[in-house]
Amino acid sequence: MVHCENSTPVKEFVLLGIPLSYQYQIPLFLLLSLCYLITILGNATIIVVSLVNAQLHTPMYFFLSNLALLDISFTSAIVPKVLFNLLSGSQTISFNGCLVQSYIYFLLGTTEFLLLAVMSFDRYIAICHPLRYRNIMSPKLSFQLIICSWVGGFLDTIVQTIMTFRLPFYGSNVLNHYFCDVAPLLKLACANTHLIDMLDFILASSLVLGSLFLSLVSYGCIISAIVKISSAADRKKTFSTCASHLTVVFIVYGSCIFMCIRPYKNSKVDSTKIVSLLNCILTPLLNPFIYSFRNNAFKDALRRTIRQRGIFTKV
């Protein structure tokens, strides 16, 4: 808890950001801008192509489109402000702006965990119960699973966000991060934050480990079913349909377990900056390439979309 006697209420926070000398700020700005642009274009392409091609109107691409929308929103909650601060030299963010950014970041992050678990379940049904897949993964159930993911993310984050921003903040307003993360915010509060520390830790641990457990159970069943396939070619083809999702699961959970599972008071904020930046930038950037642009069905649909729009013509 910071020293708060004879202090004025905090109306804005100063984000320390990533400590870099001035000569590296412009290259970082250009790199982040390029990554952000590719992220938006790549994920938007998944959404558009999945919508306009009837062949992709399946539960898998419905979930992928929702993941793409999440990735666009997730990275947009953080990166534009980082770019603005790098370009303008200003490191401030208003109190209300900090509240909104923090809530959106954790809402979308927790929703993505639940969506990854849903996608694991979808792959389990597709591979372990292929004859019943269409009946089980109906459009109604797919929509309900998406709604449950969003509602779960909302319920998981709303209580801790309200509790955090109802704390008194006076005097010190220097936030040791590049966005409004909860851990450095709690260090500035003029109150005992032990209860919120433990609540954040319990909620983060329960959601991350719970959704990871569901994903691992699904993939345990999938791998068990794959090894029973007699043909090596069929085993390889079947595993390739879910290998991309498994890759994303390892990337997302690996980075977030490092950042979130430890109690906040024992965490080193400086050591998590790079990991969280990779989580904000790298994962949304790679998802379109891991999931879709290496998928033959999606690539064929993309070519048809380009031809139909007159962008591509045969020579």
Image (cartoon, rainbow, N blue to C red):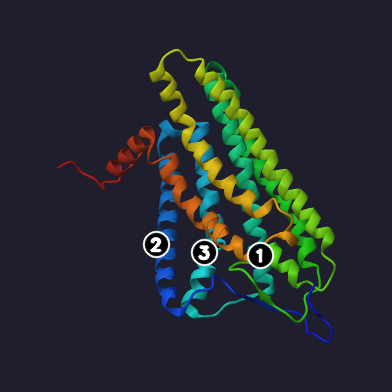
Residue 94 percent across, percent down from the top left: 65, 75
Instruction: Decide which of tag 3 and tag 1 comes sooner along the chain.
Output: 3
Q: Earlier in the sequence, mark 2 or mark 3?
A: 2
**Residue identified by numbered label 1:** 100
Residue situated in front as seen by the camera: 95 or 15: 15
SS type, badge 2:
helix
Q: Is residue 182 left or right of residue 196?
A: left
Q: Residue at x 80, y 59 (%)?
A: 196
Callout 1: helix, strand or loop? helix
Label 3 belongs to which residue? Answer: 79
- Disc tally is 3
Tag 3, which secondary structure?
Answer: helix
Q: Is residue 123 above or below residue 75?
A: above
Q: Position of residue 56 (x, y in %)?
A: 44, 34
Work out how far the residue at label 2 is from the one at label 3, CA to CA, in angstroms: 11 Å
148 vs 162, left or right, is left
**Looking at the picture, which amino acid does disc 1 mark?**
Val
Q: Mark 1 or 2 closer to N-term?
A: 2
